[in-house]
């Protein structure tokens, strides 16, 4: 297993980290949907036994059970050999006292006296002002002074300008962003990777396979890979190598569910050339062609310009079209159905549309928004929680 320095903290970690958001689940019976503890323990311990030293979880994962499963799996000798990173969301930090209570609870669940890394979970352009106002990073620093945590970081979802502002606000030890070869101009963007490196901040990557979608490409994409000089390289390996190529990246998280996936990934991240700068110009060109081919597969040609907003009913039109396109392009319906379901909480759901037509008059692409919302709803409605 290849290892990389963890920013300026003076230790290194395995280049592949295990994300504990997609642990194996029970598939049948009254407990269907819950984490399957036996298979999860086996997965976590196999990873720790085969060179994975970085385990990432969060307060909220698996209905708040992921930390406890990881803690139990690492009990009995594994804990000391690995680094544990977990996150607390703003949603759970209603008061300053909550922040401490949640940390104490997390330590109990993880069966440890300290966390290697504690992150503010999912800073976004909408939550950043509140996080600053409440000085949550300062609260985390107090935990560090008490020896309860050893590094302070954050995970991020949003655009590059806000990421730049968050990263420049203070000397963070680490940050965690979504990046993959398809999203180089989205989220924190490829510029975010370079910026984190310039600041000496450990950089952990999430969604390297876009929820697994990049590992199961449609036929049009598969043929680009298959016709290349590397016909036997898997789509997942191509996606991972894009990130391995960046010297700024300390660790790439993958939410592996099966032992088979874990073994394949360990092999990819243990290759002799799994090093910074591993991609040749020819390989970069191929990934550029793959990205362009994915973009051509967009089914609703919405540009995300948002001229159609606000909808008087609150329908989040561009978001719905993006979720729909991702479901079609990446052939991964369930994660997108869940995202669509979550729009109900934010009141942006497609079922709110009353077909008033106001949005269609404003759309520069002249999209049949009402019709496309119906089609999207038919495909995406179906997640039960
Ligand atoms: S047609 Fe539907 S989505 Fe468009 S503005 Fe009216 S309610 Fe909103
Ligand atoms: S105006 Fe049209 S292209 Fe722009 S976000 Fe709305 S639906 Fe998409």
Image (cartoon, grey):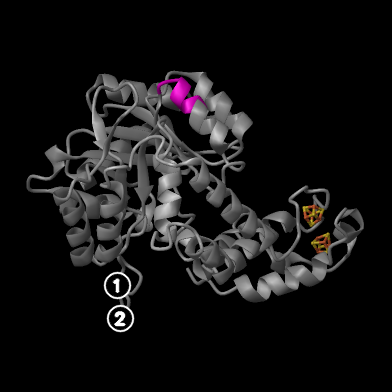
Give x and y (percent) for residue 160. 60, 33
Residue under the image location 53 percent in, 32 percent down:
192
**Circle 1 sits in a helix, a strand or a loop, which is it?**
loop
Please tell me whether residue 142 is drawn above or below residue 246 in the rendered image. Answer: above
Disc on res. 247: none
Q: Does the residue labelled 2 lie within 8 Å of ligand 1?
A: no
Q: Which quadrant does the N terminus fall into?
A: top left
Please tell me whether residue 176 is drawn above or below residue 340 in the rendered image. Answer: above
* Quadrant of res 215: bottom left
Query: Ligand 2 quadrant?
Result: bottom right
Disc on res. 29: 2
Q: Is residue 222 visible?
A: yes
Q: Give the range drawn in magenta.
A: 195-200
Q: Which of marks 1 and 2 is in front?
A: 1
Give x and y (percent) for residue 120. 42, 35
Name the residue tied to disc 1: 26
Front one among 105 and 145: 145
**Pointers 1 and 2 in contact (CB under 8 A)?**
yes
Residue under the image location 30 percent in, 81 percent down:
29
Q: Can residue 59 be seen in this view?
A: no
Question: Is 196 colored magenta in this rendering?
Answer: yes
Q: Is residue 272 left or right of residue 74?
A: right
Front one among 178 and 139: 178
């Amino acid at each position: 297993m290849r290892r990389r320095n963890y920013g300026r903290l003076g230790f290194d970690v395995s280049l592949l980290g295990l994300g504990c958001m997609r642990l194996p689940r029970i598939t049948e019976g009254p407990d269907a949907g819950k984490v399957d503890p036996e298979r999860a323990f086996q997965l976590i311990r196999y990873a720790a036994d085969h060179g994975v030293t970085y385990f990432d979880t969060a307060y909220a994962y698996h209905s708040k059970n992921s930390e406890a499963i990881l803690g139990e799996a690492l009990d009995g000798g594994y804990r000391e050999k690995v680094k544990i990173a977990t996150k607390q969301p703003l949603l759970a930090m209603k008061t300053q006292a909550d922040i401490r209570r949640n940390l104490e609870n997390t330590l109990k669940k993880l069966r440890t006296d300290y966390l290697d890394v504690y992150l503010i979970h999912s800073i976004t352009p909408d939550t950043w002002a509140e996080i600053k106002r409440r000085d949550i990073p300062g609260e985390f620093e107090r935990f560090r002074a008490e020896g309860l945590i050893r590094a302070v970081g954050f995970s991020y979802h949003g655009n590059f300008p806000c990421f730049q502002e968050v990263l420049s606000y203070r000397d963070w030890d680490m940050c965690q962003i979504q990046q993959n070869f398809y999203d180089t101009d989205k989220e924190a963007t490829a510029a975010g990777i370079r910026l984190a490196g310039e600041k000496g901040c450990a950089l952990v990557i999430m969604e390297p396979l876009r929820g697994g979608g990049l590992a199961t490409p449609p036929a049009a994409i598969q043929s680009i890979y298959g016709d290349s000089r590397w016909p036997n390289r898997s789509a997942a390996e191509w996606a991972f190598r894009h990130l391995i190529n960046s010297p700024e990246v300390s660790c790439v998280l993958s939410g592996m569910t099966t032992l088979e996936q874990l073994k394949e990934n360990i092999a990819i991240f243990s290759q002799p050339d799994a090093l910074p700068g591993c991609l040749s110009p020819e390989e970069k060109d191929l990934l550029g062609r793959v990205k362009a081919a994915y973009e051509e597969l967009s089914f609703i040609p919405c540009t995300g310009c948002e001229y159609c907003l606000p909808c008087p009913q609150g329908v989040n039109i561009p978001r719905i079209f993006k979720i729909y396109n991702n479901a079609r392009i990446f052939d991964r319906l369930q994660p997108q159905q869940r995202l669509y379901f979550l729009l109900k909480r934010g009141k942006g759901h497609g079922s709110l549309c009353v077909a008033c037509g106001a949005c269609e008059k404003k759309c520069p692409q002249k999209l049949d928004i009402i019709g496309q919302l119906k089609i999207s709803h038919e495909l995406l409605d179906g997640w039960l929680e």
